[in-house]
Image (tube, rainbow, N blue to C red):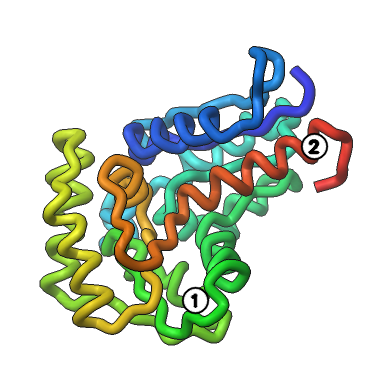
Amino acid sequence: MEHFFTIIGGMGTLATETYIHQLNLRTPAHSDQEYLNYILVNHATVPDRTNYILDHSQPSPLQPLLADFRQQASLGPDFFTLPCNTAHYFYEQLKQVTDIPILHMPREAVAWIGDNLKAVKRVGLISTEGTRADHIYDDEIMAAGYDLILPDEKIQEQTNQLIYAGVKEKNHVDRQLYHEILRQMFEEKGCEAVVLGCTELSLAQDREPYLEHPVVDSQSILVDKTIDLALRARAGEKI
């Protein structure tokens, strides 16, 4: 297979399914042959990223992820995508096992703000506690010159409930809860844009979109970047 990319997914599976659905939906294709070539590694048994980041005595996701990247690199994809925000904690270590480009979802999301929301200064973040603890978004947001606004304990607990008790456990998005989380970030915390720093939150945005204020959907941005790179690689451009 020529000109394909590899998706290291399954963290979680339902969020990866949303990524794939949007990827196929947005690809400018009018026949079978115009869709993109890709390999999906749905590695659902990778240990929980947040559990490990918060407590290093828990099973580490790193070795399974390194094995996935080494295995897939041997097949020669044009690039990799990693549609799990929290897994980007290991990004630098994953880069060490391959010279093939790996898209950095948090970095792409923050760059999107600069390109599309030029008047924004106060950027909020909702995510897993693991992503909060590893600062992968904090560093990118502040390095770009934005004021970072984080949720308080109540909003974080609500976000955890939405992600784990709702999407991961029941494949259910509580629309009222999701919209209330964002309402609080915008109206009570004074955010001008809010980054969805978890792919389960991207799934919530896909199913129950919040349209009152600017939501920066990291997975949606990754979809668009994936399509752009894949089409450029297919056309023979260097990426």
> N-terminal of the two: label 2 or label 1?
1
Q: Nearer the viewer, residue 59 or 143?
A: 143
How far apart are the alpha carbons under marks 2 and 1?
Answer: 29 Å
- Asked whether, in this view, residue 123 is left or right of residue 209, the answer is right
Which of the labelled discs sits on residue 221, or is there none? none
Using the image, determine if residue 216 lies above or below residue 164.
below
- Asked whether, in this view, residue 214 is left or right of residue 167, the answer is right
Residue placed at 35% from the left, 74% from the top? 124
Q: Residue furthest front?
A: 212
- What is the secondary structure assignment of the residue under circle 2? helix
Residue 173 sits in which quadrant?
Answer: top left
Circle 2 crowding by C-alpha within 10 Å: few under 14, some 14–19, many from 20: some
Q: Where is residue 2 drawn, in percent x and y?
A: 78, 22
Where does label 1 land, which residue? 141
**What's under tag 2, amino acid-wise?**
Ala
Q: Nearer the viewer, residue 217 or 100?
A: 217
Q: Are marks 2 and 1 in contact (CB under 8 Å)?
A: no
**What's under tag 1, amino acid-wise?**
Ile
- Asked whether, in this view, residue 135 is left or right of residue 74, the answer is left
Residue 193 sits in which quadrant?
Answer: bottom left
Q: How many marks?
A: 2
Q: Where is residue 139 drawn, in percent x and y?
A: 49, 77
- What is the secondary structure assignment of the residue under circle 1? helix
Residue placed at 35% from the left, 43% from the top? 206
Q: Is residue 86 visible?
A: yes
Q: Where is residue 20 drawn, in percent x and y?
A: 48, 31
Where does label 2 land, which residue? 233
Q: Nearer the viewer, residue 239 or 10?
A: 239
Residue 214 sits in which quadrant?
Answer: bottom left
- Asked whether, in this view, residue 143 is left or right of residue 57, the answer is right
Residue placed at 57% from the left, 67% from the top? 116
Using the image, determine if residue 178 lies above or below residue 214.
above
